[in-house]
Amino acid sequence: MADDGTSRRPTMRDVARAAGVSPTAVSFVLNERKDGRISAATQAKVLEAAAQLGFRPNLTARQLRLQQTHSIGMLTDGIASSPFAGQIVRAVEDAARRSGRVLLLVNTRGDADLGGAAARELLDRRVDGLIFASTVTREIAPLPELASVPSVLVNCFPAPGEPRIPSVRPAERFGGALAIRRLLAAGHRNIVALPGDGDWAAQERTTAFRKEMRAAGLAVRRGSIVPGPYTIDSGYDRALALLQAEDRPTALLCGNDRIALGALLAAQSQGLDVPGDVSLVGYDDQEELAGSVRPALTTVRLPFYELGLKGADALLALISGSSVPPRQDVHGELVERDSVAAPRSP
């Protein structure tokens, strides 16, 4: 603190007096402005005096000078309250902190009117850029406010005909290929996919399923793809019907870990062993679920943290004036656990 016995915040003039230099020299040093007339020794004295006094620069004045507030805004439609997709928010927070920026986060709860109002409020606070992140990977019509500042979409992408805002999304076709290849490598040939409810991610993974089955010389028969909701009950009901059939599959490829858990319960209800009688592969890697059930689920990990990190890096690049790709697809990985084995011989 300043040496006058008060509790006021120390100023540059206080630093100058303590260092025995001019306020102008202090301003150049503390604002990191170049001046060849200021020696290294003087710079060291200024920095030492500032540290001793506990001087903190006036960020508002600096922001006005640089035309940046060193803050970024983030709008989500529910990710902030999602236990595993919340990793996207954590990644953006980490990237913002490393860049010396503050993250301002608003959860729109999927309400377009609330989203527009929140975006305008963030713009009123003069954020340097905006990120919009979706809980579900999908096409969207981006909020018009995103066109006002550098903006990036995370876990979503513009629908055809919408403004081409840069986007970062999971490579779902790649992830789907990882899942089916694991079952094929184990020797399974009678495989049924329970891909989900027909959303974009399910469509991409189903395309991978068809392609990899054909590449293995296997026909995708009628009934080899059974869509339905991403729920435990749906997984149970669909798997139960399949496992009670005369030609029951030796492996089930599930659209998420909840479907896989339902399939596991269905198999156990029929006295079937997993993975001895039927193998299961999930998707998402909800660790509190996939890693906790017995047997633990082999699954494809959705790269939520990486999505947030690449989205934040893209936004920071845009803010600095650099160009970024119009779309980045981020690869997940197969997490090996205990729910896949070779099929038993007839």
Image (cartoon, rainbow, N blue to C red):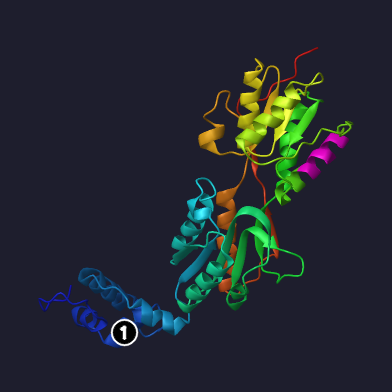
Relative side of 201 to 88, left or right? right
- Indicate the secondary structure of the residue bearing disc 1: helix
Q: Residue at x 83, y 33 (%)?
A: 223
In the rendered view, tell whether residue 22 sits above or below residue 328.
below
Quadrant containing the C terminus is top right
Quadrant for residue 340, please give it.
top right
Relative side of 258 to 7, left or right? right
- Magenta stretch encompasses residue 103: no
Depth check: 53 or 311 in front?
A: 311
Q: Residue at x 50, y 36 (%)?
A: 288
Depth check: 133 or 72 in front?
A: 133
Quadrant for residue 343, please give it.
top right
Q: Position of residue 85 (x, y in %)?
A: 54, 49
- Magenta stretch encompasses residue 208: yes
Q: Residue at x 42, y 83 (%)?
A: 64
Q: Residue at x 68, y 39 (%)?
A: 255
Q: Position of residue 156 (x, y in %)?
A: 65, 58
The magenta span reads: 206-215
Q: Position of residue 214 (x, y in %)?
A: 88, 36
Task: Check disc 1: other Cα within 10 Å, few if <14, some if 14-19, many if 20+.
Answer: some
Classified by dominant secondary structure, the portion drawn in magenta counts as helix
The amino acid type of the residue labelled 1 equals: Ala
Quadrant containing the N terminus is bottom left
Depth check: 293 or 60 in front?
A: 293
Relative side of 164 to 211, left or right? left
- Write down the residue under mark 1: 25
